[in-house]
């Protein structure tokens, strides 16, 4: 069975490479998307591209990639800490600095083992009374707590309960919004005490219909959902939030093999504030 999975994986990887190159050519892009819209084409892409095709839902993408995920979100390679800020972090620093005196409670959704905390404290000094809480998977939480304890970090906490986001001054969703099937405005709207500030960073957004794909980073593969940018912002607006800043995370891009025109040339960052 493992040999069959490896062979199938090799076939999918090479097919994706071929279609990716074809999609970079104007006529090739038209051909791929024309075929994809037909019933035969959808079946064909489903067979030849496997987990590298696009999916209607996040659940479909997760089921398709599961045999090839290489550990998914709990792959140790995802847990490596980096204190070096990425280019898209500097926009976040710009909005954070002037607002730090008002921020005492931070809730970091999908924050792994506290990667962002260890990076940000070198660039944006947090108050001694500020508490940074990370929500993530159980194994990541366990490792994060061990690392925080070994580093004598007192103001970094971990939780598996999303309700701990209640009363947060700042909600951070950096590099993780697209892994949640529940839209972020819906989650925020259900909080009894909503955050004053919301930082969304490094997420692939689309201006077309929402769909799901699999991110292939070679050492790890995870399913993600491309939310519609305009709808996301409009839903936050209805909750009383306004977009104060928006930027491109040009260091990240996402190729949609069977929908080349829907590929994301740069991820997006947003800073929102409640009126």
Image (cartoon, grey):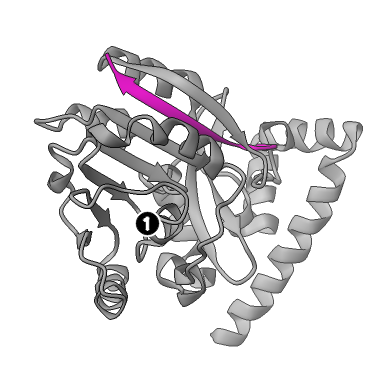
Q: Quadrant of the N terminus?
A: bottom right
Q: Position of residue 245 (x, y in %)?
A: 49, 23
Q: Residue at x 72, y 65 (%)?
A: 13
Q: Residue at x 42, y 28 (%)?
A: 271
Q: Position of residue 64 (x, y in %)?
A: 50, 59
Would you say residue 266 sits in the magenta stretch? yes
Q: Position of residue 159 (x, y in %)?
A: 18, 59
Mark 1 residue element: helix
> Camera-side residue: 197 or 49?
197
> Camera-side residue: 74 or 149?
149
Residue 28 falls in image quadrant: top right
Q: Residue at x 14, y 47 (%)?
A: 164
> Camera-side residue: 1 or 149?
149
Residue 275 falls in image quadrant: top left
Q: Position of residue 202 (x, y in %)?
A: 52, 43
Decide if residue 226 is in sight here. Answer: no
Q: Residues within 10 Å of mark 1 (few under 14, many from 20)?
A: many
Left or right of residue 222: residue 118: left
Left or right of residue 40: residue 148: left
Q: Residue at x 20, y 26 (%)?
A: 189
Bounds of the magenta span? 264-275
Residue designated by label 1: 117
């Amino acid at each position: 069975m493992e040999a069959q999975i490896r062979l199938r994986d090799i076939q999918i990887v090479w097919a994706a490479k071929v279609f990716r190159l074809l999609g970079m050519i104007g006529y090739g892009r038209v051909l791929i998307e024309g075929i994809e819209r037909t019933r035969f084409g959808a079946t064909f892409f489903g067979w030849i591209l496997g987990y590298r095709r696009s999916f209607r839902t996040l659940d479909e993408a997760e089921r398709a990639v599961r045999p090839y995920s290489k550990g998914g979100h709990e792959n140790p390679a995802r847990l490596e800490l980096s204190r070096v800020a990425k280019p898209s972090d500097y926009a976040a620093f710009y909005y954070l600095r002037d607002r730090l005196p008002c921020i005492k409670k931070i809730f970091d959704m999908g924050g792994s083992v506290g990667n962002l905390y260890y990076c940000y404290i070198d660039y944006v000094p947090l108050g001694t009374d500020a508490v940074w809480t990370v929500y993530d998977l159980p194994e990541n939480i366990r490792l994060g707590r061990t690392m925080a304890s070994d580093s004598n970090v007192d103001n970094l906490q971990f939780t598996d309960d999303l309700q701990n986001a209640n009363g947060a001054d700042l909600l951070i969703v950096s590099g993780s919004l697209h892994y949640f099937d529940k839209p972020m405005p819906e989650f925020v709207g259900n909080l009894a005490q909503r955050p004053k500030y919301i930082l969304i960073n490094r997420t692939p957004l689309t201006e077309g219909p929402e769909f799901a794909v699999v991110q292939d980073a070679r050492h790890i593969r995870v399913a993600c959902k491309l939310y519609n940018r305009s709808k996301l912002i409009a839903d936050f607006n209805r909750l009383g939030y306004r977009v104060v800043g928006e930027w491109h995370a040009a260091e990240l891009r996402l190729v949609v093999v069977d929908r080349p025109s829907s590929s994301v040339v740069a991820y997006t960052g947003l800073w929102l504030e409640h009126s």
